Image (cartoon, rainbow, N blue to C red):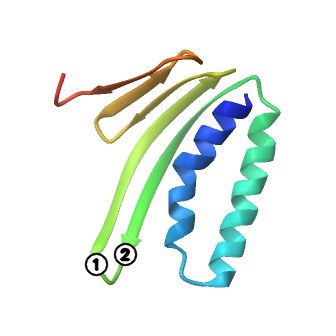
């Protein structure tokens, strides 16, 4: 489960680097710490989420919806037209447009 938690943190931590203030960084870190602690206690879980990227300077404001299912070291992540599947040893990525 630790590998899975690490993967989740890596996926979600991208938004941490987008914060411009110490206050934003502190709040983001608190949320991620609480999330990691909570998910490490689960044997399995499923979540639907929205990933939002906003950069006013570059004129970027986009959202992508996704779904993550985790059971032990196995997971299935669906986001942005791709599906990432792991059986705990091997990771496959299926990109719908590329078949």
Taking 62 as reference, is 47 above or below it? above
Of 9 and 43, the residue lying toward us: 9
Residue 49 horizontal/vertical position (percent): 51, 45
Q: Nearer the viewer, residue 22 or 47?
A: 22
Q: Residues within 10 Å of mark 2 (few under 14, many from 20)?
A: few
- Contact (CB < 8 A) between labels 2 and 1? yes
Residue position marked by numbered label 1 in the rendering: 58
Whether residue 34 sits left or right of residue 89 in the image: it is right
What residue is rendered at 65% in x and 41% in y?
Answer: 6
Question: Residue sitting at 32 percent across and 33 percent down?
Answer: 82
Is 65 placed above or below 77 here? below
Disc 2 secondary structure class: strand
Nearer-the-camera pick, 47 or 19: 19
Q: Quadrant of residue 60?
A: bottom left
Left or right of 54? Residue 4 is right
- Secondary structure under tag 1 reads loop
Residue furthest out toward the front: 89
Residue under pointer 2: 55
Q: Identify the residue at image location x=56%, y=17%.
A: 89
Left/right of residue 12 with respect to residue 35 in the rendered view: left
Where is residue 30 drawn, in percent x and y? Answer: 75, 64
Residue 1 in picture, x, y percent from top left: 73, 28
Which residue does the image show at 52% across and 62% down from the upper left? 15
60 lies above or below 14: below
Residue at the far left: name it.
98
The disc label shown at residue 27, or none: none
Badge 1 crowding class, 10 Å Cα cut-off, few under 14, some 14 to 19, many 20 or more, is few
**Image quarter in which the C terminus is found:** top left
């Amino acid at each position: 489960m630790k590998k899975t938690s690490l993967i989740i943190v890596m996926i979600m931590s991208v938004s941490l680097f987008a914060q411009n203030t110490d206050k934003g960084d502190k709040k983001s870190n608190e949320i991620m710490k609480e999330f990691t602690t909570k998910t490490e206690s689960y044997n399995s879980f499923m979540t639907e989420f929205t990933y939002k990227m906003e950069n006013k300077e570059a004129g970027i404001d986009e959202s992508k919806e996704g779904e993550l299912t985790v059971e032990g070291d196995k997971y299935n992540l669906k986001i942005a037209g791709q599906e990432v599947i792991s059986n705990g040893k091997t990771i496959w990525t299926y990109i719908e447009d590329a078949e």
